[in-house]
Amino acid sequence: MFDDNIRGICKWEKGKKKDINDYKISLNFVEKYADKKQINICGFEYRYFSTKPPKKAFKHNCHVYSAMLIKNNMSYRWRLKYNEDVDLCLQILTNGGTTASCIYYLTNKTSTVSKQKGGNQDELYKGNDPKKKLLKAKMLEKVWPQYVKTVIRFNRYHHFVDWKQFKKTV
């Protein structure tokens, strides 16, 4: 599953992020890892979340957003209107499953608040309405009060999940 605002993939090479043209290599890399380790959801970290070359190619039991390989034989399903990827990861992790985010290959994702067609542009992101941001964060907090808090981040309402509580060796 790839969001419509993914604009490409890059990788760490010699200490720098380098755009790549052949996505098959990165997709195969993530898929082989997910199969080998029996990961329920495996995907890519965002380019702007990764600031230094990683020591390992994956981080485990964390958020996986926007670019995901999902094991289809799971009983967990998309169910929320907003933050549905966070909800899916929390369903998996609270039931003993695993997630992994590749930090060697990264996605180039356009901000959800930038103007583009598709997605939730007209309903949720139009005008960057703070009330809609609060609604989006509160919806997730209502479903997962033990894990999610609504906070102000990046000068707006945002959900916060402390993913460290799910850390375990994979």
Image (cartoon, rainbow, N blue to C red):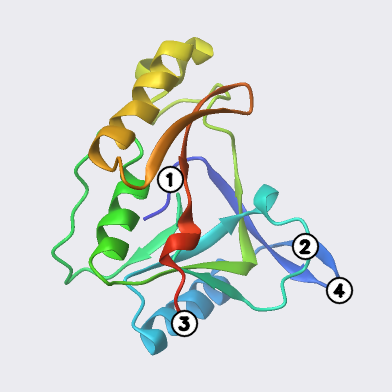
**Disc 4 to disc 1, C-alpha distance:** 29 Å
Q: Which mark is residue 18?
A: 2
Against 164, is 167 above or below? Answer: below
Residue type (three-letter) at the residue carrying disc 1: Asp
Furthest residue toward left: 75
Q: Which residue is mark 4?
A: 14
Q: Are marks 3 and 2 in contact (CB under 8 Å)?
A: no
**Disc 4 to disc 2, C-alpha distance:** 9 Å
Q: Residue at x 27, y 62 (%)?
A: 94
**Disc 2 to disc 1, C-alpha distance:** 21 Å
Q: Which residue is mark 1?
A: 3
Mark 3 secondary-structure assignment: loop
Side of 4 relative to 15 (left or right): left
Q: Which mark is residue 169?
A: 3
Mark 2 secondary-structure assignment: strand
Q: Residue at x 18, y 54 (%)?
A: 77
Earlier along the polypeptide chain: callout 3 or callout 4?
4
Earlier along the polypeptide chain: callout 3 or callout 1?
1
Residue type (three-letter) at the residue carrying disc 2: Lys
